Image (cartoon, helix red, strand yellow):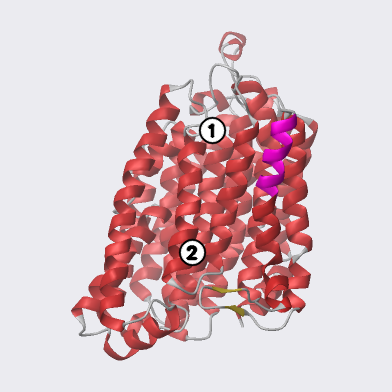
Amino acid sequence: MTANDWLKLMPLIILAATPLVMMLAISVKRSHVIAVVLSVIGLLVSFIAVPAAYSASGDQIGKLLIIDKYALFYFVLMFWATIAIIIPSYQYLEMRFKGNREEYYLLMLTATLGSAVLAASTHFVSFFLGLEILSVSLYALIAYLRQTNEGIEAGFKYLILAAVSSAFLIFGMALVFAKTGSMEFGAIIAFLKEKSNYDLIAVGGVALMMVGFGFKLAVVPFHMWSPDVYEGAPAPVTAFIASVSKGGILALLFRFFGDFNIVQSKPLFAIFAVIAILSMFGGNLLALLQTNIKRLLAYSSIAHFGYILVAFMAGNAQQNFKGVEAATFYIVSYFITIIGAFIIVGLISSEEREGMELKEYRGLYWRHPWLSVALSAMMFSLAGIPLTSGFIAKYYILSSGISVKLWTLVIILIINSALGVYYYLRVTVEMFSNVNEEEKAGLLKPNVGIFSGLLLALLTVALVWLGVFPTGLIASIQAAMF
């Protein structure tokens, strides 16, 4: 490896070294505060190394990784998202977990490393290694609150189903390799361009790989784990699964199919279209029935990733990355809103229980006005209401779908967006409803720390800012895409 290669890898090297430093620190003295500080410092230093990696010449690192502008964009997004999750985790764990807390941050950092490796992968080997680094970390993170039956159940379900999906993924890789003779994304896509309409083994291999993709993204029909895991996992871990974990998979999906026109391949287009349609309808219709906010957000996330798949297919059809640009903007917006929403869920908690039921949010405005305003902004953004980043994100996805005449998908997206407005506004209505003194006494009281409150304020400002002035982020995405 050359000096440029080492420079390119520096963000990943620093991120990988941070857990090692933390383990040495833990061996000397256990301290929750030190663990948080080291985690944030490690992520900040990894972020600071990104400009150096950007300036180094040569993007390809061997055959396994490519550290280009696209990968670096996702690195930055993941690093800052993880920082935003780690900061409120301190208060959450202090309140809800009495055991050793330092390992939580080790696992969070290794999971982020796995997602970052996925974003930079160009080979089946790096793809699978990144996926397993991410998955194994999540097994423990989901069940971290091991004193609760829900946490253990969620971790066990994720472990079993992730193992099954990995088996499908590996079998699909084997079929693709048997037919193409290569594990490199470029060679595989070149083969699919020629024979994707009639080579059943290659298309079947990609379809089996989609089971692995679909499980991690929790799209229909691979979504059954999502509501139980969202409900049983600690609120900050749920935020991580909904954002950084899925972001890494989407980054890899966009890269893998980046030069391939899915619309021209009838079998693959049918697979993606059916998954997108079922995810939009399934996610929204099931979310309408929920009275638990974590399960509501779990089902709504299924619908959101159905929307993203519409933009993804449109981008491949255009071969000019406009759809992927729209999908990437949507991902950034979704990161901000979903992390903010789960931070608030974590803050509305006590030592005995988490604020998951919608009834806990009844009259929140009269108990904590600022928190109710912040959560309302998050709900408005998820619903796609104007002056929020979610509105701009949905507009760009609709625009990309219309530009390539995917009319059926566009119409279904519009219908489902209207369905989503109902259950997001239901949360807001609960917060602004009146409660009597007797009801108020049985509700959880929010405990907002200084750092959590400041972070929540920044996320709220960011989603409104991007809803009014989105051009800066769009320009950054365009620079990374092309």
Left or right of 457? Residue 273 is: left
Q: Is residue 370 visible?
A: yes
Amino acid residing under circle 2? Leu
Q: Which residues are magenta?
A: 18-28
Q: Residue furthest bottom?
A: 194
* Depth check, front residue: 122 or 392: 122
Q: Which residue is mark 1?
A: 234
Tell me where residue 440 appears, x and y as whole percent: 60, 14
Tell me the distance, in whole angstroms, between the alpha carbons under discs 1 and 2: 23 Å
Left or right of 288? Residue 27 is: right
Amino acid residing under circle 1? Pro
Residue 26 on the magenta segment: yes
Tell me where residue 80 appears, x and y as whole percent: 70, 54
Say whether disc 1 or disc 2 marks the residue closer to the N-terminus: 1
* Callout 1 touching callout 2 (CB < 8 Å): no
Residue 250 numbered tag: 2
Tell me where residue 458 appears, x and y as whole percent: 76, 47
Q: Is residue 426 above or below residue 354?
A: below
